Image: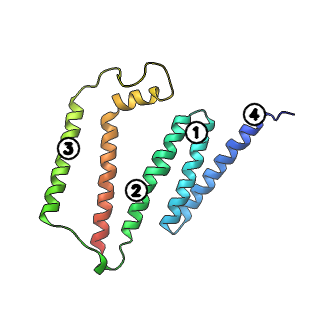
Amino acid sequence: MTADYGLVYQFFFDLFGLMALASAAAFVTRRSPVGAALWLVTTMFNIAALYVMLDAQFVGAIQVLVYAGAIMVVFLFVVMLLNLGRPSDVVDIRGLGVRIAAGVAGLALVAELLVMGRQALPAELPWLPEQSNVVTPIAQPLFHDYLLPFEITSVLLLVAIVGAVVLAKRRV
């Protein structure tokens, strides 16, 4: 007795899609930011399951590692950091040494971006294997054509987190 693979596939695809929609709706209706973040993680896992069902295993794994893992950890860190408590508990470090260190780190990042933008990468990436696999079609454009926008996006995310912390400290 064999089950129809198409019906089982369709059932689970629809199930993961409905669970993604339901958890996304729960995400936008939560009052607690931590609860909302957990519902967003649930949404990310359901989307990753949909990617796996569409034979995009690498994208599904990246969905879990990057979005459900790293981005959500950063999001929860910022949410918990914004809940600063009483003003007397907050220590504001704005010494000259900290400002100089931040300026030097910022200049180093800008210098890296300028050097990266001026250097031309080879047409073929030598560290990627020659055989065709799942990663090569994604890695080739990402690390060749879109390397600078990819790095700029990561710096912008960092700036957004620092901006959220600065704005939260001004309210206190």
In the current view of this chain or complex, which residue is farthest to the right? 1
**Closer to the eye: label 2 or 4:** 2
Residue linked to disc 2? 74
- Tell me if label 4 and label 3 are in contact, CB under 8 Å: no
The structure residue drawn at horizontal position 57% and vertical position 52%, both measured from the top left corner, is 43
Residue linked to disc 4? 6
The structure residue drawn at horizontal position 75% and vertical position 34%, both measured from the top left corner, is 6
Q: How far apart are marks 2 and 1 (CA)?
A: 23 Å
Where residue 95 sits, quadrant-wise, is bottom left
Residue linked to disc 3? 110
Q: Residues within 10 Å of mark 4 (few under 14, many from 20)?
A: few
In the rendered structure, which disc, 4 or 1, sits on the residue that comes first in sequence?
4
Where residue 102 sits, quadrant-wise, is bottom left
Q: In which quarter of the image is the N terminus?
A: top right
Q: Which amino acid does label 1 sit on?
A: Tyr
What percent of the width, then of the height, locates residue 115? 20, 34
Task: Report whether residue 145 is seen.
Answer: no
Numbered circle sitting on residue 51 = 1
The structure residue drawn at horizontal position 67% and vertical position 42%, both measured from the top left corner, is 13
Q: Which amino acid does label 2 sit on?
A: Val
In the rendered structure, which disc, 2 or 3, sits on the residue that comes first in sequence?
2
